Image: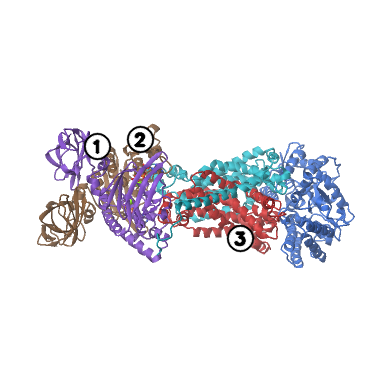
Chain colours: A purple, B brown, C blue, D red, E cyan
Amino acid sequence: MAEIRIKGVAKDFGTFTALHDVDLTIADREFMVLLGASGCGKTTLLRIIAGLETATKGEVWIGDRRVDQLPPRERGIAMVFQNYAVFPHLTVFENIAFGLRMKRMPQAEVTRRVTRTAELMHIEQLLKRYSGQLSGGQRQRVAVARALAMEPEVILMDEPLSNLDALLRLEMRAELKGVLAGSNTTTIYVTHDQVEAMSLADRISVMNGGKIVQAAGPVEVYRNPAARFVGSFIGNPPMNFLSASPAGAGQWQVGGQVFAGPEAPAAEFAIRPEDLHPSDTGLPAEVRVVEPLGPHTLVTATVAGQPFRAVIDSTLVPRPGDVLHLAPMADRIRWFNPETQKAL
Amino acid sequence: MAEIRIKGVAKDFGTFTALHDVDLTIADREFMVLLGASGCGKTTLLRIIAGLETATKGEVWIGDRRVDQLPPRERGIAMVFQNYAVFPHLTVFENIAFGLRMKRMPQAEVTRRVTRTAELMHIEQLLKRYSGQLSGGQRQRVAVARALAMEPEVILMDEPLSNLDALLRLEMRAELKGVLAGSNTTTIYVTHDQVEAMSLADRISVMNGGKIVQAAGPVEVYRNPAARFVGSFIGNPPMNFLSASPAGAGQWQVGGQVFAGPEAPAAEFAIRPEDLHPSDTGLPAEVRVVEPLGPHTLVTATVAGQPFRAVIDSTLVPRPGDVLHLAPMADRIRWFNPETQKAL
Amino acid sequence: EALFWSTQAKPVEETQAMREQVLAGFEGGVDYQGMDEGPWLTRIQAEMQAGSGTIAVLGGLHGDLSGLGEGLMDLSAIDTSVIGDAMLELGRLGTDQQLYVPWMQATYLMAANREALQYLPEGADLNALTYDQLIAWAAAVHEATGERRFGFPAGPQGLRHRFFQGFLLPAYTGSTVTEFRSEAAVEAWGVFAELWSHTTPASTNYSFMQEPLLTGDVWIAFDHVARLADAFNQRPDDFVAFPAPAGPEGRAYMPVLAGLAVMNTAPDAEQSMALVNYMLQPETQIATLRATNFFPVMPVDMPDDMPASVQAFAPAIATMTGASDALPALLPMGLGELGGQFSQIYTDTFEQIILAGRPVEATLDAQAEVLRALMVQANAPCWAPDEPSDGPCPVN
Amino acid sequence: MPRALPYLLLLPATLFLVVFFLYPFVNVAWDSVTRGGEMTLANYQRMASHWKFPTAFWNTLLLAGIVVPIQLAMALTMASIVTKLQKGRSTLLYIFAIPLGISDLAAGLIWLAIFEQSGFLNSMLYGLGVIERPILFLSYQNTWVILLAIVLAEVWRATAIMMVILVAGMGLIPKEYGEAAEVFGASRWQRFTRVTLPMLKPSLQTALILRVILAFEVFAVVVALGGTQFPVLMSETYQWQFTMQDRGVAAAYAMVILGISVAFTLVILRLLHVPKEARI
Amino acid sequence: MTEAGTQDAPPAPDRVRRSGRWVFVTGVGLLVAWVLVPIWLLLANALSAPAEVTAFPRSIIPSFDTASLEFFFGFRGVLDALWNSIQVASVTMIVAIGLGAPAGYALSRFDFPGKEAFRFLVIMTRAFPLPLLALPLAVMFIRTGLDDTILGLALVHATLALPFAVLITFSLFSGIPVELEEAAWTLGCTRLQAVIKVVLPLAAPGIAASAVFAFVISWNEVFAAAVLTIENRTLTAFLLQSLDVSPLHLKFAGGAALVIPALLFIFAVRKYLFAMWGIANR
Ligand SMILES: Nc1ncnc2c1ncn2[C@@H]1O[C@H](COP(=O)(O)OP(=O)(O)OP(=O)(O)O)[C@@H](O)[C@H]1O
Ligand SMILES: Nc1ncnc2c1ncn2[C@@H]1O[C@H](COP(=O)(O)OP(=O)(O)OP(=O)(O)O)[C@@H](O)[C@H]1O
Ligand SMILES: [Mg+2]
Ligand SMILES: [Mg+2]
């Protein structure tokens, strides 16, 4: 049982507060993805869970043990460091075997596990090299292999695939998912790749400025952001926000169009760029930049003077200066409170 | 004038050959993106251009100077290292100012440039910190800012945005594009993010196993891969390949369907997953896995026993086990020589 | 300033006194440097080899100077008429030139804490002790206090070899070299072994006996006068000085002679001569006595206000040298730079017999061979108390 | 040019050493194989046949063999403590480094004052009523106490040299490796042996080589505490050079010291070799 | 094989921590005492009256009689000697580091034929007893006029300190990632500039350690100082030369008088002995 409970954890670095009262529970065997802007405290949170950093306050529980005071090695975790921390004085083999040796595992088992995880990470032909002889991506895979080989109760991964090419990342992602799903491991996984987040996560926690803003299933987070930040952060390109002016009870005027919305003193209109389709009655968007993205085209425009992006089928090729009418899908429109920035 | 010409460059590490006879010309002010699998030699190539590694053979020209024998500082380059190499003993400010001070730039100008690039990279509030007090992404941005502040003739960036969140990356990408377009800089940019590659590149060089396989504009590389590897490497998910059997002159039978193709002794059929649409007459695909990716759905299936992926509109939600008929768009079908793996 | 390069008066207080009380009166000033033998010698050798130098005057013990023969200037021009012939002879180093002139002299004495006097064997006269009485005394102190309280400077800087060369062996054999392995010598070593059984084992760390006397670790001690002085000066009332003991052949004692020499490379020979001359003035000699506890090499009138140590030592020395059974043993002559190895033979013998407990005869036989070889190599004739010899001094 | 660079960097130091070391060294080495102007091994024979030579030789090795491992352990402990500490580290480092500033002569003096018959140790024991009369620790009869005293004094005096080198080396080990080891289940001790020590190899190498070499030249402390009772190679060298004024034999001794130093250096270099690929 | 997790209940973490802490603090305390007590004894003796120094039982609290110390500082020429010592030590430091650091750098960054030979030259320098070298050196110095100069003595001391400087800087430079240097090169540094701006600051602890050694070696060196300087005596040669044959109380006072400046120097550089910045590759 390796449920992780984080209760009111805060972390100050001198006067700078990196984490504010974080509360989070990760169920046993759950795959939790941590998403958040650069510098929002993801690594810090992982390090506190791992025991490498002492929280200024709060409690960390793994299973039914309170682990705050325990040294890292007693917490039953393994970790992939954002900067790999592959031991330069050990070969790849010995790096992967490091944790196993610490457990005094018999040599045969060590070799078996190392070989298996190395194959999983496609580094089996590098086992005799030292970290100085590896490329960035190879080093990163060693770091992942080292953690996987431990078969720990809890695995913390800090952007473990960031330096891999797309193809390999796709593969690794699938391998990781496979391996971890078949194990008893609870995973916390930091990534900046939203596709990765979506495809791997049981749940996604979105962090902002040292706080957890939303923790929910991937679709939920994508479709129903709990706060404006989540919408603006997730999705590539992110959600569009347009100011709305009241136009009667539950009616809001946005970019010259009127939409049904919540009954509230003020509200902000939001729609994802891909939830728009060209239509004569849509929002009038003045095209600024057109970027072909392979199958689709990203259009950057302004609606009522506010920036606005749409992803449309690449069959349609507007030109800068054109006015494109884009109709939002009604069930995809979201509304936010402009003051609290929470969803309405 | 900072055209970069690489002529027959090879690099051996002991018995391992990291680069085989690479020839590449990057035009003055061009933005060249280097794409390739992990460990294929991208960093090595950059380091040879920068003068940090000596090529086993070959020549490197920048402008009309042959620079092989010149020390790095005389090559007029700046570089973002894959692992940042931010100086730990200097503040962020001094890190960014480092190169400028080497040029004996007046203090006022130094401050101006540092402030500007720091703002560009959104690290202006971190200027007084040391690298040990930064998050991974912040450190990476310092490395980028340090190179940009130099306003060099040639800038080499090794996965400069890999540790940034999607939103920030999007922004940074735009900023970089803006700054570099407005300058005299020739750029070589290694990335694993294909969207980034597509949106930034004037041209993309695809590397594989120490060789350059194709160097062409983004759309060309995407649409007309010169080799099977390029197709399989670029695109997320990558191109689908199906074996084809001859069915008369220029006619090939693929997955039970007959398509017009090249006249050749043998050929392999290829189509991008997004260039398929459900249709009763399409290729019969047996659905294995269905992954919702926000606006679209990724379907992993088999066609005639061969793996096959399709990205379809998320309105359609097939179930594993279903047979989906997927028709390729005729003008998007590509053919490869199964022996040489080159495009036909 | 003339550089006075000396192995004597190195303890800081003595150096200070040399500079301020002895040499201040010399015109042009003197830079007095008291050195360990190592650097002292190295510098001299360097100047000799280089053929030019800065040292004006060398000061050293007979043993220090005897190895320098060829590099030294003939000082016959200096008026040495008031100095005894025996001493001048030593200064010729076996040549017919005055290679050094006697500067000051001293000897070794016994000293005791007054507390120890109560255990003096009955009938023993402090001023005419025999070795047997000394042993009995040391034994009595040992028994009474439970501590071995005889002290002997057997440390690395200690002058232990002089005790064997000039005191113990001559007292029993009447000889230093010739009778080195005689029966009498065996007896002498036996006596010493007995004395050693009442000697504090810390002796192997002692270079100077004044400190253990002051701390009370040692009650009865043998040492060079200059190395006892501090005890008498600090606590004049607590200690007594008395002559060395006598053996069957007499009350052997060895003088210590320090000399002044000038190197051929001296920068200003005239100034050097002047300084040597200055050192031989009676007033300077008395000042030197005050500073170093070394006695003048010529007859002088002593003032009354001499330091406590001098007041204690002078009568003891007089008693020793004037004793009816006095047996002076001279410093080695004609050994040149082999003087160090000569002394080492005695030290080695001591260490092997007494400390390492090796058989006496065998050790003496072995060392005698070394000694014989050395004398042959040096081609040195015997000196007192050995009978004069033609050719190298024989070892029987 | 780049190929010449290392040589250019070494050139000043090499020239310097050639003039100020190699030239006099060759002189002395020549002394060791000549006697009266003729080539001979007589000096070595003389040295080897002297009855104190084996004692001095083994004493020197024994002393180094005891002192260096203790110092290594202590220096590592001190360096780890200092490195680990957040507050007060520079004060502590300073305290630990103090013996560095103390010459071996002064150190001998201090420890003599402790072990002497009327020294501090006896005073303390006496004051505590443990003993009734002072014990003579440094007697020629119990060489092992002398050895112990010398060991203590040497450990006290010369551990700081190693410690400071190791502190400097430890400071350069990136923290992240220790953290990684910690996460992967290494106890404090394992972290030390599996990460810190291997990554500290270059510094360990330097510290050990310097310390071992100095241990073979140990002299002043030994003489202060052991008197004539604990001959070591260096004290014999002195004796022959200055007391017996036989430069040939002294030079032979010096060559022996050099020989064992070089031999041990080779061993250390071999044991603590870091393969090129495994460097940071 | 071993089942982690199914062991007996671990001890309460708090207790473990606290007892661990206690052991740690005690250990540190013992080490501190181990270093400081003998120093204190030296100072206590130096501050005692002569009679106290030889008394038994000895008191570890001195009477603060400064007569012995004053005797030393009242010596004619002490100040000159002090100044000479400082000069010699400083020149030694500069020469040793100035020549040693480049060599250490070359050893750490390049592989080249002759590397081992150089290493051996360095080690031999330290492994050969100086007193024997003093004679040929002195002859050479007298002939070339370096005799009795600050510089001459400093050169000899630098010979002693150079091996330290070379080996220490070598090991320290080896610990600094080449990549940081490479980054500096791409930012317009020459090799030298990169070393000065990047490597040296990071290697400050090692440089400081070398400096301390160079200083202390020079400061405490007696033999060469005694042989090679006459007028320009260093403090050590001036005071310590004859210390072993001086009365006890003066021995201690002289010892203390010599120790104090060295301690001040170490105090002054102590903070550089630390790596102030953690080095992380990424
Ligand atoms: N010093 C070395 N010794 C041996 N092989 C090396 C050495 N340095 C790099 N290599 C190998 O050379 C190949 C190219 O490395 P390089 O760092 O250029 O890859 P890359 O394309 O940058 O990969 P990544 O995307 O993972 O950073 C890799 O397979 C790597 O293992
Ligand atoms: N030692 C420190 N002193 C001061 N601030 C620090 C320190 N360490 C981290 N921080 C700050 O704390 C914040 C959180 O850092 P953290 O490393 O957790 O970010 P992150 O979410 O992992 O970012 P990234 O995605 O860029 O890695 C950052 O703003 C960082 O600047
Ligand atoms: Mg992070
Ligand atoms: Mg790379």
1 vs 2, front mark:
1
Quarter of the picture holding the C terminus of chain C: bottom right
Judge by depth and name the residue closer to the eye, C95 or B274.
B274
Q: Which residue is mark 1?
A: A337
Task: From the top left corner, tell me how far across and down residue B71 is, in percent.
Answer: 38, 46
Determine if marks 3 and 1 fall on one subunit.
no
- Determine which residue is flagged by label 2: B115
**Do the residues under discs 3 and 1 have CB atoms within 8 angstroms?**
no
Q: In this rendered view, identify the residue nearer to me: C347 or E53.
A: E53
Task: Check whether the beta carbons of the residues at disc 1 and disc 2 lie within 8 A of each other.
Answer: no
Marks 1 and 2 share the same chain = no
In this rendering, would D251 be left or right of C130?
A: left
Q: CA distance from mark 3 to mark 1?
A: 82 Å
Q: Residue furthest right?
A: C324
- Residue A200 rendering spot, x and y as whole percentages: 27, 53
Please report, as a chain letter, where disc 1 is located: A
Q: Where is the N terminus of chain C found, in terms of image quarters? A: top right
Vertical relation: C272 (above or below) B54: above
Q: Are marks 2 and 3 in contact (CB under 8 Å)?
A: no
Residue pointed to by mark 3: D62
Residue that lies at the very extreme toward the top in this rendered image: B108
Q: Position of residue A248 (x, y in %)?
A: 16, 33
**CA separation, marks 1 and 2?**
35 Å
Amino acid bearing label 1? Asn
Identify residue type, mark 2: Thr
Q: Disc 2 sits on a residue from what chain?
A: B
What amino acid does circle 3 point to?
A: Leu
User: Ligand 2 near label 2 (Cβ, under 8 Å)?
Assistant: no
Q: Position of residue C379 (x, y in %)?
A: 77, 59
In this view, C281 is above or below C147: above
Q: Secondary structure at mark 1?
A: loop
